[in-house]
Amino acid sequence: MDIRCGTAGWTDKTLIVCKRFYPRGTSSAEARLRFYASQFPLVEVDSSYYAMPSATNSQLWTERTSEGFTFNFKVFLLFMGHQTSPDALPRDIAMALPEGLTGPRKKNVYYRDIPADIRDELWRRYLDVLEPLRANGRLGLVLFQFAPWITCAHVRRKGLHSSKNTARG
């Protein structure tokens, strides 16, 4: 049995504030990831839950860690049925949302309300983020933290989403 331990992020505030984990002078995200990866074999990318990450960052993470290091990746909260601020979306996507989904009275959007073509584009971008990790053997688990009101019956009945192009070989 292979048991690996890690934390929910190399920039976790408690690791930084305690001043006992990172060596003095390890202040950039890059330096912290490099050091973290020398101490643990895996990390949970928790920030991907709160905002759409970039494929560029994923590629950099693979370059800054050694072979065998694993990134468990949390799925973006919008995909899991949670209310989501349009600010968490890529700017061009937020700007493309139809009138009525945003505005002073509408602080959050839900997956079900977003047009199918925009959902498909968000999934495409999300899979693009995972690709450098997958291609370099660094992608571990993809963690789904569903909203409390999403039940097993709902997932079985409706599936994870309505896009037809999410699986990759």
Image (spheres, helix red, strand yellow):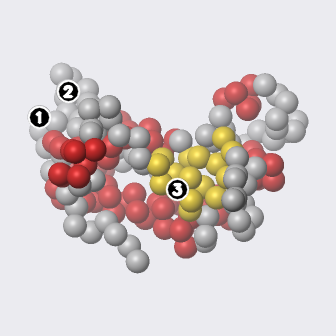
Coordinates of residue 93 in the picture (x, y in percent): 28, 49
Residue situated furthest left in the rendering? 100
Q: Quadrant of residue 8?
A: top right
Coordinates of residue 4 in the picture (x, y in percent): 70, 52
**Pointer 2 residue:** 106
Residue at screen point 22% across, 61% down? 163
**What secondary structure is found at the residue carrying circle 2?**
loop
Coordinates of residue 165 in the picture (x, y in percent): 27, 69
Q: Which is nearer the eye, 38 or 6? A: 6
User: Taking 152 as reference, is 61 left or right?
Assistant: right
Residue at screen point 70% across, 47% down? 5
Coordinates of residue 105 in the picture (x, y in percent): 18, 22
**Pointer 3 residue:** 141
Residue situated furthest top in the rendering? 105
**Pointer 1 residue:** 100
**What secondary structure is found at the residue carrying circle 1?**
loop
Pointers 1 and 2 in contact (C-beta within 8 Å) = yes
**What's under tag 1, amino acid-wise?**
Gly
